[in-house]
Amino acid sequence: MSSSDVFNYEEYYPTMSFKTDGFVQPFGDGPHDDHQSIEMAYMHIINNAKRYVYITTPYLIIDNEIATALKLAALSGIDVRIMMPHIPDKKLIFLISRSYYPELMKAGVKIYEYLPGFLHSKMIVADDEVAIIGTANLDFRSFYLHFEVSCLLYKTSSVLEMRDDALKCIEEGKLVTFEDLRKISLFKKLLAAVLKAFVPLM
């Protein structure tokens, strides 16, 4: 029902006040705009890292831009580490995710798999200064097709807590080696190659 009443919407705005020792900026992204805010924020952090970049994600289905940024950072001497689950929730997606390991590892990216169980955290932290945490996976659907929300943190104590959490996960994980990759059957490698053509649908 419509009416001619004039509403003061500010009365319904929530009032929130939080103390922080740095900068915190929530932001969202979705398929209806012309740019990928979350992917660009990830790339900005990776491209500007000076010492390290730690990433945790349950899925690793990346486009050429993210792959190039990760490889260039590692080749430049940045300590780039990606933590993945060892026990997946979606076996086919995990198979595709693992197919990206070789090219990243050849450039010096260290990939770990979390042994205790499934890993569902989605975050990136770099240089004890900047981090992003939110709903977005490091995959095509999150960057291009889904509505996602993330939070950028800069020079807050939470960044250090995220770093410590990433390092704890790494300690409880296994560093993936080329020997591990050689143990993957030829059938699974061929299946992953075929499934990559359908990545936007998965």
Image (cartoon, rainbow, N blue to C red):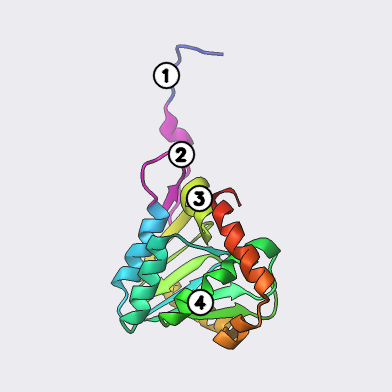
Label for residue 148? Answer: 3
Do the residues under discs 2 and 3 have CB atoms within 8 angstroms? no
Distance, label 2 to label 3, CA atoms, is 22 Å
Pointer 4: residues within 10 angstroms few (<14), some, or many (20+)? Answer: some
Identity of the amino acid at label 3?
Answer: Glu
x, y percent for residue 69: 36, 68
Label for residue 102? Answer: 4
Do the residues under discs 1 and 3 have CB atoms within 8 angstroms? no
Mark in front: 2 vs 3: 3
The main secondary structure of the magenta stretch is loop
Q: Of the residues under marks 1 and 3, which one precedes in the sequence?
A: 1
Along the viewing direction, whichever of 88 and 4 lies nearer the viewer:
88
Along the viewing direction, whichever of 61 and 193 lies nearer the viewer:
193
13 falls in the magenta region? yes
Q: Quadrant of the N terminus?
A: top right
Q: Which residue is mark 2?
A: 13
x, y percent for residue 187: 68, 70
